[in-house]
Amino acid sequence: MHINHITKFLTIGTVAVTGLMPGGLAEAGSRPQVDFTGTGTYEMVEFDVFARGTTEAYGRPFDGQATFMLRTDDGTLPEPGECEPGGANFALTGRKRQELWGVSLGEVCGQWVQEPTSVVTHVFTGRYSIAESKPRLGDTEGWIEIRLATANRASITLFDS
């Protein structure tokens, strides 16, 4: 029996696509456990070593108030164009006694401010993991971004990845 090249190509392609479909469909159909963002304010505390912020957060797993504590390894925020290792602890308190606590490690980078269009002074980007939550979330980790801006404004974004 002779199989022509076109039939062989189509058969191999169909098998390959079929083999990928279950994983692709499962990934496309699953929703992230954590996907929220919030805006609010921050202040420098404890001799200007920590940036402590409070934001109203919206998203998944619940809406509520997010708080964070951001610190660089050397205790100073970097100058524009420079980056330093750092970390942040964060918590999300929702209505109905829902709570979420996490830790993250990453990098804080100083930004060039050019008002009125560019007001962000520092950006922390890193990886987080959930230490504890109510209701209990499975093993959850992802990326986090905290932005500090002029006039003590702040934002936080977490996404399960």
Image: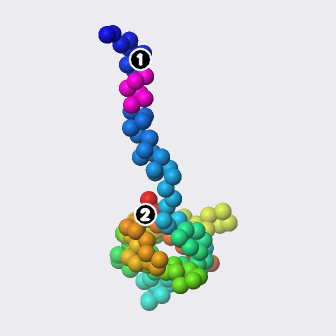
- Graded by Cα atoms within 10 Å as few (under 14), some (14 to 19) or many (20 or more), the crowding at tag 2 reads some
Helix, strand or loop at mark 2? strand
Q: Residues within 10 Å of mark 1 (few under 14, many from 20)?
A: few
Q: How is the image coloured?
A: rainbow
Q: Is residue 14 magenta?
A: yes
Left or right relative to 30: residue 150: right
Q: Kindly identify the residue that appears in the image at 41 percent across and 46 percent down.
A: 23
In x, y percent, where is residue 136?
Answer: 43, 75
**Looking at the image, residue 89 lies above or below residue 84:** below
Instruction: Point out the stretch of residues depicted in magenta.
Output: 10-15
Amino acid type of the residue that numbered disc 2 sits on in the rendered structure? Gly
Q: Where does residue 85 sit, x and y in percent of width and height?
A: 36, 69
| Residue type, numbered disc 1 | Thr
In the picture as drawn, the residue positioned furthest to the bottom comes out as 46
Q: Nearer the viewer, residue 87 or 134?
A: 134
Coordinates of residue 116 in the picture (x, y in percent): 68, 66
State the SS at label 1. helix
**Farthest residue toward the top?**
2
Residue 130 visible in the picture: yes
Which label number is shown at residue 7?
A: 1
Q: Residue at x 46, y 79 (%)?
A: 134
The quadrant of the rendering that contains the C terminus is bottom left
Name the dominant secondary structure of the magenta segment: helix
Which residue bears the numbered disc 2? 142
